[in-house]
Image: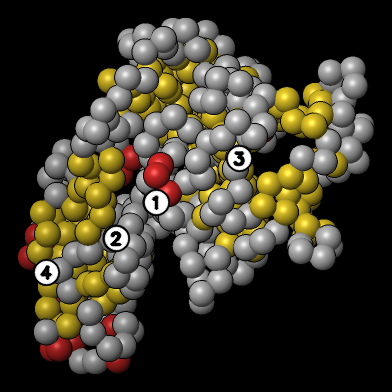
Amino acid sequence: MAAHLTLLFITSSLLPLLTSSQPTGKITLGASICANDTSPPWLSPSKEFAFGFQPLSKNNNNSSYVLSIWFDKIPPKTIVWFDRYTAPLGATLTLEAKNGLVLRDSRGNPLHTYTENLAGQVAYGAITDSGNLILSGNAATHYWESFKNPADTILPGQTIESGGSTLVSRKSPTELSYGRFYTGINADGKFALTTKTLPTNLNVDAEYYTAGPGSSERVAFAANPPEITIGSTVILRSSLPAADYYFRATIDFDGVFSLYQYPKKFDGNSKWEISSGGTLPENVCLAITGDKGSGACGYNNVCSLKDGRPACRCPDGFVLVDQENEYGDCRANFSGDCLGQAGLDEYRLVTIKDVDWPLNDYVQMNRSTLEECRDGCLKDYLCGAAIFRSNSCWRKRLPLSNGRVDTSLGAVAFLKVRK
């Protein structure tokens, strides 16, 4: 469990070759898969979907794997379901009657049960052509389904139920551990996008997007036509034919809920593309405005919209805390972040137009001039930034949250940095 859930991007040629010995469709008790690079996955009857282990990045020369379901006929092998437990190299997954999917080490000792608290004895499993892994009893009663235990993606034919399943984003495009964004049905029966804090996953922010009439019990992803609805409200829709395209809807690591499409007749240039009008919210930078949490980007970072996605950039005088995570926190580019450690004459103000950090002020001054706003922040030990607009001035402490580019405000930001 200590390994980071960082997915290795690998081409189809590096995955196990499909052979006639691979289980397809129905999976019998005792069937097993090993956590390694060669163990063949279980396949759906059409071989559109595969179930097995995908490799994660190597950590201290130790390989680890994640149990997942993926599109198997297209490059890359796009994961649509996964469990966030990391399986060590050589561990074996077996379908058992009592506990379903159980992972054991080389000595047969149990490491992890993926399907706990089953209501009855499992008779067999199946991976369907819709991408759903099902564990069933003798009376064809479904005791567990991947469709009812989603990760960050739903597929055509799948639903999100009120009081049940929620989608949780990844931490990054390649790191599968819990991210900051959730989607599901809220207490009012509406489809909702919500932020969480890491690592506790507590609800720290107001919902940043909702849709639907209220009092609804499920979000449904119809196959034909491809559309996502809550009650009678269509949330997202594609005009392309289901017969010619694969579809999936994902709450991405950046907080955008997207409807994706991929041609079934693909070539070397084919890739997953967002359906026309297939993202929610329209501008995630402006949508997230809670008084807790960092916003769409990290603390002290600034979010701008690029091709419907958030792009994050540290302002002048600040650098990323983690140079490999552009969406993360920014820190002042000098030693000692406490503004009071140096004399006021050692600071200057950087002027940035059309940038705001809302809901983070400790002083609001009405009837202020631009010069008064700027000079007041420079002379105030507590002030890390000030926003001037409409003859008002807001002084803010560090760290700054909800940073965004917003050209509609006519705002000017003054950011205090070391000379």
- For the point 24% across and 72% down, which residue is it? 319
Q: As drawn, which residue projects farthest toward the left?
A: 371
Question: Judging from the image, what secondary structure is the residue with disc 1 in?
Answer: loop
Q: Which mark is residue 254?
A: none
Residue type of the residue flagged with mark 1: Phe
**First-in-chain label (2 vs 3):** 3
In this rendering, does residue 251 appear at all? no
Q: Nearer the viewer, mark 2 or mark 1?
A: 1
Q: Which mark is residue 41?
A: 3
- Mark 4 — residue? 350
Badge 1 local density, few (<14 within 10 Å), some, or many (20+)?
some
CA gap, disc 3 and disc 4: 56 Å
The reply to whether dot 4 and dot 1 touch (C-beta < 8 Å) is no
- Mark 1 — residue? 9
**Residue 214 vs residue 36, the one in the foreground:** 36
CA gap, disc 1 and disc 3: 17 Å
Question: Judging from the image, what secondary structure is the residue with disc 2 in?
Answer: loop
**First-in-chain label (1 vs 3):** 1
Q: Which mark is residue 326?
A: 2
**Residue 258 vs residue 102, the one in the foreground:** 102
